Image (cartoon, coloured by chain):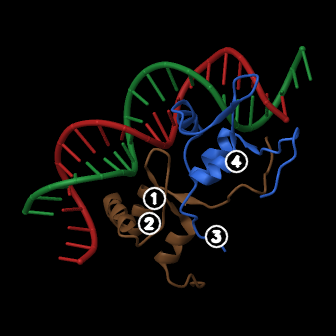
Chain colours: A blue, B brown, C green, D red
Amino acid sequence: MQSAPSTTNVTSLLTPGEVATMFRVDPKTVTRWANAGKITAVRTLGGHRRFVETEIRGLLSTVPAQQG
Amino acid sequence: MQSAPSTTNVTSLLTPGEVATMFRVDPKTVTRWANAGKITAVRTLGGHRRFVETEIRGLLSTVPAQQG
DNA sequence: AACGATTGGGGTAATTCGGGAC
DNA sequence: CTTGTCCGAATTACCCCAATCG
């Protein structure tokens, strides 16, 4: 149980394209998931979406074997 | 371009149709293999399956040795 | 202010899912 | 025992173009 800092939040955000690549789907599909509330989306000031890496990786279950 | 996050999972995934074409079988058959646990399947948030390319390639040929 | 690339939104075709039977 | 096809429904992919991102 490591306590994180207070004011600094080191949350890695992924772009729709990144998430789309991880799931092998179209970026538009990731947008659909966000609209459906299936994934948490952080909106930029311009309206673009950013996704929490930890959440995405958590959704990417089954832990496929590492290539190599 | 955004960036090249090293933390991003670089696992290549294939669609049922892709795997079906590689094995020269019906996509439905690939689904049966996944249901039987014969192959690892990663599900999208919509329920569609994605298969690990390395796993499929390994199944296609037991030993991907160099071939004339 | 300008540039290249990505994203968002809407709409339609293609693919995939799930079950049951032969 | 395994595979391919049928049906209905859901999900996904690709088309357009304007806006946003870095």
Which amino acid does the dot numbered 1 rest on?
Glu
Residue A28 in the image: above or below residue A24: above
For marks 4 and 2, give the CA distance: 32 Å
Tell me the mark number nearer the camera, choosing from 3 and 4.
Answer: 4
Same chain assignment for discs 1 and 4: no
Instruction: Provide the residue designation for mark 4.
Output: A53
Give the camera-side residue of D3 and A40: A40
**Could you say which disc has been placed on residue B18 in the image?**
1
Left of B15 or right of it: where is B3?
A: right
Instruction: Provide the residue designation for mark 3.
Output: A66
Residue name at image x 63 percent, y 61 percent = B11
For marks 3 and 1, give the CA distance: 20 Å
Residue D10 in the image: above or below residue B41: above
Task: Report x, y in % for residue B27.
Answer: 35, 58
Quadrant the C terminus of chain B occupies: bottom right
Task: Report x, y in % for residue B21.
Answer: 41, 62
Same chain assignment for discs 2 and 1: yes
Which amino acid does the dot numbered 4 rest on?
Glu
Residue name at image x 60 percent, y 84 percent = B66
Task: Report x, y in % for residue A51.
Answer: 68, 40
Task: Report x, y in % for residue A3.
Answer: 82, 52
Are the residues at dot 2 and dot 1 in contact (C-beta closer than 8 Å)? yes
For marks 3 and 4, give the CA distance: 18 Å
Chain assignment, label 3: A
**Could you say which disc has been placed on residue B22 in the image?**
2
- Give the mark count: 4
Are the residues at dot 3 and dot 2 in contact (C-beta closer than 8 Å)? no
Residue B35 in the image: above or below residue C17: below
Chain assignment, label 4: A
Question: Badge 4: how crowded within 10 Å, few (<14), some, or many (20+)?
Answer: some
For marks 2 and 1, give the CA distance: 6 Å
Left of B48 or right of it: where is B12?
A: right
